[in-house]
Every structure is written in structure tokens, then in C-alpha cells.
Image (cartoon, helix red, strand yellow):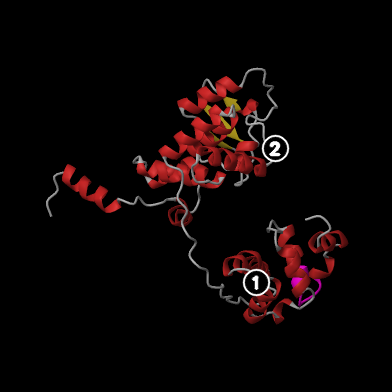
């Protein structure tokens, strides 16, 4: 966080914290970050609560801060960018023995509307159009995300040195989880990458792109020419991967491990989309198994 209040406080030092029996929110936030806490979103909160003693901050103050900083934003945004980081700092202060533990209510969140992932027909129409447009790297990156669960940031950062076509693997380096992740390629994706690799150097980006926005724009343009609905990289990537894997019969734990999801709640609530004919599918399964109730 360049030129942030957190960085500025760290540069000045935080020695007074250990001699002050009643540290401020600012001092606690600095100590929280120095001990591995997430600094994202903290700057405006520190500016708002600033030098207030940590013990003088109550749940009402934190919710008022969220409403003041994000007056028109949704409850989800207020929770993510204000309540959660402020609560983390206060919890850190409690664990250090600097304040009492307080309970902060989150703002009500509307259930997000489910967007339909890409199905097999959409992928076929998209790749056919992209290939006709001589954009084989575009069809390749979409299929790569849809069949490995890779995020767009991981896909555009993939280098040829981390692709082993003989073993059929791609190593995603420094993913969102801060650990390397090995993904396995389908035969179709491996063959597409094999055709793209000619004259490529080990440090070259596999899919050429350096910005996710450029991928968004290209996908939108191909969708328009193919006369199919636009699907964002996240929707035609991780959402499609999760839903397709479950529909093919993969169990939840296996699919989560393959795509590196940590929370089963998030995975099931957001990424796995139920089939429209779910009831009929279950009934047919009972019939196939000759189950009589």
C-alpha cells in the first residue's frame, strides 16, 4: 500500500505501542499488519478511527464507520471492505490483551443472483468462432480455464517453462492461495498448446495476454460474432469447471481439491450451479437402480 497510513506508521516505528496501556486503533492496525495481517482496505478505516483508543471503540462505531465510508455501496461491500478488516484489527488487539472482545453485526447481504456457467454447446460455439477468427490463443485460454479451474490472473501469468506437455500438466505459480498449484490438461487443451508452442521461449506467456481486461474484451468480441451470450472469464472458467465436474459425477471433495477451493460453503453456494432438470435426473437414477420406495 504505497504512501498509505499503515506504511507511514510502520516507517515511524511503533515503539510507543508497548509502553502505552491503551493503544489506539492506528497502533493496533500497524501491529496487526506487522504480524501478518492483511493491509488491504485498512487505510480509510485507519484514517476514520485513527487515534481513538482501542478500548473506546464499540460495535456501533464500527458500523457507523462503514456507513460513512461506503454510503451508497451494498451490504456485501461494507462487510468486505469495512466490517471484516476493522473486526480483524480489534480481534488482534483482544488477542494481545489490549481490549475486550466485542461482537460486530454484519450488514444484511442480498443473495447474489446466480449466473449460468458455460455449457458444452456454448464452449463449442465459442471455440469454433475464435478458431475461425484466427484467435486460437483465445479459444485455448477459455478451454484451459474451463477444464482446470484456473483463474484469469493465473492463466495469463502462465509461462511455457511451467507447462509439461509430455506429462500433460501446467504449474500455476504463486496463485491466490500463495502456493504453487499443479493442474492437469485435457487432451484437447494439450494439443492446442502443442500447436501454439512453436518458436516460443520458456519465459514467454503461454496465452500472450498481460492484462485480464484485454481477455474480457476479446471474449466479448468473439461472443458477439458467434451470437452467444457473453460469459466473463470467471464464469466460463471456475464456474464452468465446478459445475461440469459435479455433473460428470466427480464428488465435491475431489472437485474442490482439483480447483483449489478451501471453503465448501463458498464452493457449493457460489460455484456449483444446479441442473434445471435436477428432479428428473434423480428420479431417473432411482429408476435405473430399480429402487422401490
Is residue 44 depicted above or below 290 in this figure?
Answer: below
Q: Can you say which quadrant of the picture contains the C terminus?
A: bottom left
Q: Earlier in the sequence, mark 1 or mark 2?
A: 1
Locate residue 22, reporting x and y percent: 76, 77
Locate residue 35, reporting x and y percent: 71, 58
Q: Can you say which quadrant of the picture contains the N terminus?
A: bottom right
The secondary element bearing badge 1 is classed as loop
> Magenta span: helix, strand or loop, mainly?
loop
Asked if the magenta segment contains residue 179, the reply would be no
Residue 253 falls left or right of residue 37: left
Pointer 1 and pointer 2: residues touching (CB < 8 Å)? Answer: no
Q: Does residue 132 appear in this view?
A: yes
Q: Which residue reaches farthest right?
A: 12
Q: Looking at the rendered structure, which numbered label has been put on residue 210?
A: 2
Task: Report the residue at 53% width, 46% height from top.
Answer: 230
**Viewer-nearest residue: 260 or 197:** 197
Residue to which mark 1 is pinned: 72
Is residue 152 depicted above or below 22 in this figure?
Answer: above
Task: Report the residue at 49% width, 39% height from top.
Answer: 146
**Viewer-nearest residue: 143 or 2:** 143
Cα separation, mark 1 vs mark 2, equals 33 Å
Determine which quarter of the picture holds residue 84: bottom right
The secondary element bearing badge 2 is classed as loop
- Residue stretch rendered in magenta on the structure: 19-28
Locate residue 287, reporting x and y percent: 16, 46
Task: Report the residue at 61% width, 65% height from top.
Answer: 77
Q: Looking at the rendered structure, which numbered label has been put on residue 248?
A: none
Crowdedness of circle 1 by 10 Å Cα count: few (<14), some, many (20+)? few
Crowdedness of circle 2 by 10 Å Cα count: few (<14), some, many (20+)? few
Locate residue 149, reporting x and y percent: 51, 41
Task: Report the residue at 53% width, 24% height from top.
Answer: 192
Q: Does residue 168 appear in this view?
A: no
Amino acid at each position: 500500500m504505497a504512501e498509505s497510513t499503515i506504511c507511514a506508521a510502520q516507517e515511524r516505528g511503533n515503539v510507543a505501542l508497548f509502553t502505552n496501556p491503551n493503544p489506539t486503533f492506528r497502533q493496533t492496525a500497524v501491529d496487526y499488519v506487522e504480524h501478518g495481517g492483511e493491509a488491504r482496505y485498512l487505510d480509510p478505516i485507519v484514517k476514520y478511527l485513527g487515534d481513538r483508543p482501542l478500548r473506546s471503540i464499540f460495535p456501533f462505531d464500527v458500523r457507523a464507520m462503514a456507513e460513512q465510508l461506503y454510503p451508497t455501496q451494498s451490504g456485501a461491500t461494507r462487510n468486505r471492505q469495512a466490517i471484516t478488516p476493522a473486526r480483524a484489527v480489534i480481534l488482534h488487539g483482544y488477542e494481545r490483551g489490549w481490549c475486550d472482545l466485542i461482537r460486530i453485526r454484519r450488514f444484511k447481504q442480498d443473495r447474489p443472483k446466480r449466473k449460468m456457467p458455460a455449457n458444452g454447446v456454448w464452449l463449442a460455439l465459442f471455440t469454433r468462432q475464435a478458431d475461425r477468427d484466427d484467435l486460437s490463443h483465445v479459444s485455448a485460454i477459455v478451454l484451459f480455464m474451463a477444464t482446470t479451474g484456473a483463474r484469469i490472473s493465473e492463466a495469463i501469468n502462465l509461462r511455457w517453462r511451467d507447462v509439461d506437455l509430455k506429462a500433460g500438466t501446467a504449474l500455476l505459480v504463486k496463485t491466490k492461495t500463495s502456493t504453487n498449484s499443479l493442474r492437469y490438461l485435457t487432451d484437447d487443451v494439450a494439443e492446442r498448446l502443442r500447436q501454439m508452442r512453436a518458436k516460443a521461449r520458456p519465459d514467454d506467456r503461454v496465452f500472450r495476454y498481460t492484462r485480464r481486461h484485454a481477455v474480457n474484451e476479446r471474449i466479448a468480441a468473439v461472443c458477439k460474432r458467434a451470437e452467444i451470450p457473453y460469459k466473463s472469464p470467471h464464469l466460463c472458467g471456475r464456474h464452468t469447471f465446478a459445475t461440469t465436474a459435479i455433473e460428470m459425477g466427480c464428488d465435491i471433495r475431489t472437485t474442490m481439491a482439483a480447483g483449489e477451493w478451501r471453503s465448501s460453503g463458498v464452493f457449493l453456494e457460489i460455484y456449483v450451479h444446479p441442473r434445471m432438470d435436477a428432479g428428473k435426473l434423480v428420479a431417473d437414477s432411482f429408476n435405473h437402480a430399480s429402487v422401490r420406495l
